[in-house]
Image (tube, rainbow, N blue to C red):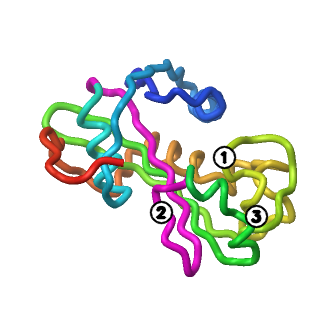
Amino acid sequence: MKTFALNTSNKGKLQEFQRLFSKHGAHLNASDIDLKEIKADPMTVVVHKASQVGESVLVEDTSLDIEGAEVGIDVRWLLHHLEEYAGRRAHWRVLLAYREGDWVYVYEGKIDGTIVPHRGKEGFGFDPVFLPDGSEYTLAQEKLDEVNARAKAVDSLFMDKPIAKFPPIKDWKGEWQ
């Protein structure tokens, strides 16, 4: 079993990932390298992040796609505009990636749901407004691993089922966020 560190400054996200790793009998260390983010599709963003940190350092990118909205990786912007999207279908996607040698491996977790008015006090980010399909509770009310995109991405990692493998992105020539 490899030892991983997760690069994040979000304590809530780190605690959630540590719990998910412990379910697999693994320990997850923390890394906090301040990365400048590129402006690109989620796959390119996570591959670029993984290319910038050390080997076996996990990076994560969360996107929330809302029916009829162009949000994607701009989740921070979304948090201030959620009322506009109540009742719309949404797709929460988590990409986990790490670099090993000349390759970046990407793992995915996806959950479909609906944006609802704020409910619940737990969690972070959009948890209070995301109602997973088949659940009566927002992620802030009850975040079961069966409806957790992070849990699904971690499961994919431990099953060694990457959805993609790319060479590292060393020199980005595009836009930055």
Q: Amino acid at mark 3?
A: Leu
Which mark is in front, 1 or 3? 1
Location of residue 170 with respect to 117 vertically, above or below: above
Q: CA distance from mark 2 to mark 1?
A: 14 Å
Q: Which mark is residue 125?
A: 1
Q: Which mark is residue 131?
A: 3
Compare residues 173 and 94 and report the one nearer the observer.
173
Q: CA distance from mark 3 to mark 2?
A: 18 Å
Q: Quadrant of the N terminus?
A: top left
Q: CA distance from mark 1 to mark 3?
A: 13 Å
Instruction: Decide whether residue 64 is among the magenta residues.
Output: yes
Residue hosting label 2: 72
Q: Amino acid at mark 2?
A: Gly
Compare residues 125 and 22 and report the one nearer the observer.
125
Circle 2 residues within 10 Å: few <14, some 14–19, many ≥20 = some
Q: Amino acid at mark 1?
A: Gly
Location of residue 164 with respect to 96 vertically, above or below: below
Query: In x, y percent, where is residue 164?
Result: 29, 55
